Structures are given as C-alpha cells and as structure tokens.
Image (cartoon, rainbow, N blue to C red):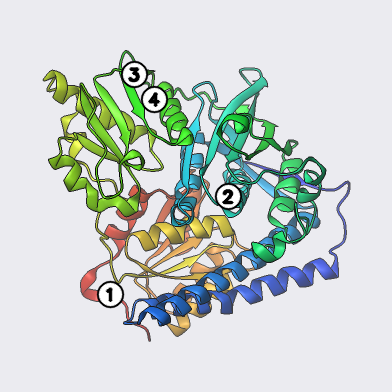
Amino acid sequence: MARRTQTKRIEDQAVQPVDPAQQFLRLMSHEMRTPLNGVIGMINLLQRTRLDGAQRAYAENARQSAEHLLGLVNDLLDYARLEAGALEFDLAPVDLEGLVRGVAELLSPRAHDKGLEIVWSVAADAPDVLADEGRLRQVLFNLAGNAVKFTETGGVRITVERAGGNAARPRLAFLVDDTGPGVAPEARARIFEEFGHADSSDAVRHDGAGLGLAVVRKLAAAMEGSVRVEDRPDGATSGRGARFRFEADFAAVAVARDKPLRNHTVGVRSPDPFVQSAASAQIEASGGTIVDQAPVTLIDHAGASAGGLAALPAAGRGIVLLKPSERDLIARYRSAGFHGYLIKPLRRASLAERVLAAVGAETGDRNAAPVAAHVEDDRVSPVQFAGIRVLLAEDNPVGALLARTLLRREGCTVETAATGDEAVAALKRARYDVVFMDMRMPGMDGPAAARAIRAGGDMTPILALTANAFAEDRRACLEAGMDDHIVKPLDADALRTALARWTKRDIRAKVG
C-alpha cells in the first residue's frame, strides 16, 4: 500500500506561550516513568523466581499497583499535551481490522482474567482510512479498557461501522459495547470531564483518576469528531450495558478487503451473544453466509459442561473456539473429532483459513488450503526468544504497551525508556541483545539517541520503530547508525522476523 504522511497541528486559536504548570507536569511525568518502569521490571523478575503462594500474591498486587500508577502518569502526560493545544497528527493509511484486532488482543488477558469475553469486528462497508493510527488506537484502547474495568460479567465488543459520508470521505463509528452496569443519563456528560466519574465511589472502587475518558473527549474534538455514551441497543434483551460511540469523518483509502469465504456457508454456536455476533460479522465480512446447518460450524468451548468438551455438530466439520488459557484442550478436541481450533478473540484471516481447510477436508478438495489447519496460533505456541534482553524506547503509552506485550509473548525480558536520553542512559548501565527505538520522542529523538549510542562505541543492534515507510525514512535511520527499520503498528510476524535476524543466542547480552 502506498503511504503518504501529513502532519496536522491542532492549535486552540493561536500559538500560545508554554504554560509553566503544563511544562512542569510534562517533565515530572517523564521523570516518574523511569523509576516506575524499574519497579515493574524488578517485580517481573521477582515473579520468575521461586515464591510461595502468599509471596506470589504480594508480588502480583505490587505489580498491578505499579502498573496502575504508570497508567495514571501516562494519562497525565497525554492530558498535559492536549491541554497545551499543540498536538501533532501524522496521517497515514490505517488498516482498520489490524487496529481493532490489536486493541482487542491487547486487552484480552485483562478481560479473560475477569472471566469476560472480548470480541471485535469491522463492517465490510467500512473502508480503510487516512488517520493518525496511534491516536485512533489510543481512543479505542481508552474506551475498551474502561469497558473492561467496569464490567464484571459478560463481555466487551469493539466494532467499526459505516455511519454516513460518501465514498471519498466516509463517516465511521467506532463502537464499544459492554455488559456492565451502564451509565445513568445524568452522569453521561460528567464522565468525559477531567476527574469525572459516573458515581463518586468509582475512583475508589476502580482505582481511577477519571482522566482516560477526558483524553478521549479531547482527542475526538481534535479529530473533528464526537464521542458519547448511551444505553447498549440490545441491553433490554441481554442485560444492562453501555455503548460508547466515537464518530468522525476520514479520507478513504481505496483498498479492497479479501472475500475468501464467498459462496461458502458457515455455522456459529456460542452461548455468548458477543462471540456469536462478532464471529458472524467476521464471516460475513469475508464473504460467507451464516446458516444453522453448514459444512463447517464454529463451536465455542464456553458452551461445554464443566470439565467436559463441547459436542460436535450433527453434520459437517467442527472448529472449536478457545481462550489462550484453554490451550491444553486443543489435543483433546482433535482426538474428539474436531477439525481444528481458533483462539479468542478471533482473527478474521485465521477464521477464513481454518474454515476453508475444513471445507477441503470435508469435500476431499486438495486445493482448499489443508496446511492452514496445522498452523499453530502464535498466542498458544511456545515462546521462541526466552531470555532475550530488549530495550524498548517508546514514549507513546499505548504503543509501548503493544510492543511490550508482543515482546514478552515471545519470551523476551523487556526494559522500557520513554525518551532518547533514557535509552542512552540505559545502554550505559546495562547490556541488551537488541534495542527497539521509536523515531519520534520528546527531547532527544530516535536518530539522535542512535548517534549518541554509536558515538560511545556501543554496537548493540538498534531497530527503528516508525509509522513512516518512505525510502528516505529508512535511509535516515541507517544514516543515524540504526540497523533496521520496522513500520508501525507492530505485528507478531514482523517482530518475530526482526528478533530472529538481529539476536544470536551465543552472544546473548548480560547485565553489565
């Protein structure tokens, strides 16, 4: 896909002088992140040692508290930037499915730990658009994270729908539905205010300062859009709940999504209405049709009895839907006659591949991608880079969380830096196998940090992280002394390829 990047500067009315209070808040937010990252890193290391049950519980509570404090610091920093009225937007083509899938998968461990389902889908008529992917992800992450926080049973659904506009400039609606307590009408404006809550006890019960939704409101306004909360439309039939709705106009990017399930029928069987609706939407977005009796049926393990397995369909092939924590059931389901599995939250491409493979097995068609049935989902496959030490220099909290999650999923030990100065200092006190360096950071940016590291004689591989994919961007990275150039948003395959290329187990770094 051809990319072009534009920079849009949001100003209140005219360029205002720097507010000393805002400047102080920004500086202190950055300063607080350094020790907090150290605290979290040491707790993570502690949790890898032998601990008894009580000690493990203490360490886990300490880690959660430290991560909550880090989230609060990040919210304060984002809010300070928005208050300054000079937030920059880098516009580039955004893969909507990749964006929404990434947010859902990032939040899935938190949701699954609470016993919740989290699902996603993008309507077939919602095109990819030109936008600032990082800011769009931040809006979705804050809305969906808020939904997970306040929902105790049921689940969270993230969807993107077409809401008007025209072919060149469609209006999109980003929807986050939950089965939580809902938001009373009199509180719906207040929760988007600074330090606002639907109920005065929420800040205590949910450890929240009330800045996340205020950041969303300001980002929505900066994108000339709107955000609101209402009752979930199907709440009357399936319990209470809220719907957060962010709408904005975007320039469309002419990229046709594939329809691999065209002319195929698929069945879906799940006790959870969100899983049922999201799976159906992904099948339809792939060109398929939902029917009760189909050659292939997706069957959610959530409908199985305690300790048992879900039943095979009466006719046709079955594909079981599992959470990552249920990976041990894969072999049992295969032995029971299921053709394969899919991990929740579902991925549309994987869903289509598994369905086509099952169709081929059912009909004897050797050209129906049978190999896909044997490809393991990376969310349940063994880690490949256990012990690799990584320094991640990234100032955007959502981007940092995404990269850190993917790296740890591969078995890496990750230390983070929020600025180029912090990255340079980290490399002076310790050794790493590889450095992932964001190109744009406050103070010393990525290229300047790379030059400083190379000037000191350190030859640790440095991989640039950037939203830009022009040849001149790659050239700028290499001229600064970096070794490679990785385009955001990170995905598991790109990250795995980079780690395999730039790390060598025989010279693994040790703390200096």
Q: Residues within 10 Å of mark 3 (few under 14, many from 20)?
A: few
In the rendered view of the protein, which quadrant contains the N terminus?
A: top left
Name the kind of residue labelled 1 in the image: Arg
Dots 4, 2 in contact, CB < 8 A:
no
Q: Residues within 10 Å of mark 1 (few under 14, many from 20)?
A: some
Mark 4, residue position: 283
Label 3 element class: loop
Name the kind of residue labelled 3 in the image: Asp
* Mark 4 vs mark 2: in front: 2
Mark 1, residue position: 508
Mark 2, residue position: 151
Mark 3, residue position: 292
Q: Nearer the viewer, residue 476 or 260?
A: 260
* Mark 2 vs mark 1: in front: 2
In space, the residues marked 1 and 4 are separated at their CA atoms by: 44 Å
Residue 469 percent across, percent down from the top left: 48, 44
